[in-house]
Image (cartoon, rainbow, N blue to C red):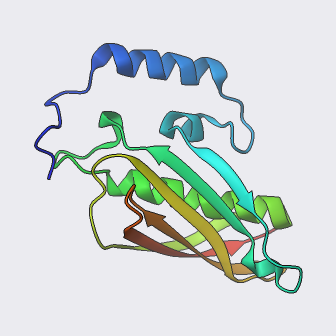
Amino acid sequence: MGNNIPKKVDESAAQAHFDTVLNDHEQAFEKFFLARFLGLDFEYLPGDAADADKDTCRVSFEVTDMLRNPQGSLHGGAMACAMDISMGHLVNKTQGPGATIEMKLQFMRPVVTGRATCEGRFLKSGSSISFMESRLWDAQGKLATIATATWKMP
């Protein structure tokens, strides 16, 4: 799987990344520390006028050595975090802040290199509870992970 993966993370690159994130983050959607640390880029795709539940939040990021597990693939926790963020940012954009009540992930294939992309969307939107999913693809467009979640809005 990860034959070309270094045995250690490049310390100077990690420190430079951490320093940049520490200096540039804000406690705001899209700019908070963890989103910056993961290197997330955000894009919001509107659904059609007849069905706002088709709105999507696309989050993409580069698979880096800092995000890999000991086997050389993207750590499942990093995937889960990005997928949770894709759903949470969509909830915030369409309904205001919310909180994850529960989330389930199914890992289908490893993501080793390149850019990972996930898309959060509503399965069923409600005024206080929403059911959502996020799907994560590798750089070749192969589906790697599916997450389903229940969200609570205040």
Residue 126: x and y in percent read 79, 83
Is residue 133 left or right of 66 when viewed as pictured? right
State the residue in front, 16 or 45: 45
Q: Residue at x 27, y 51 (%)?
A: 112
- Tell me where residue 104 sits by quadrant: bottom left
- Tell me where residue 47 sits by quadrant: bottom right
The answer to whether residue 97 of the structure is visible from this angle is: no
Quarter of the image with the C terminus is: bottom right
Name, please, the residue furthest toward the right: 49
Is residue 79 left or right of 25 when viewed as pictured? left
In the picture shown, does residue 143 fall above or below 7?
Answer: below
Residue 3: x and y in percent read 10, 43
Q: Residue at x 51, y 54 (%)?
A: 82
Name, please, the residue furthest toward the front: 140
Residue 46: x and y in percent read 79, 68
The answer to whether residue 76 of the structure is visible from this angle is: yes
Residue 43: x and y in percent read 69, 53
Q: Residue at x 51, y 16 (%)?
A: 19
Q: How many marks?
A: 0
Is residue 14 left or right of 30 when viewed as pictured? left
- Tell me where residue 32 sits by quadrant: top right
Q: Residue at x 62, y 59 (%)?
A: 58
In the picture shown, does residue 62 fall above or below 133?
Answer: above
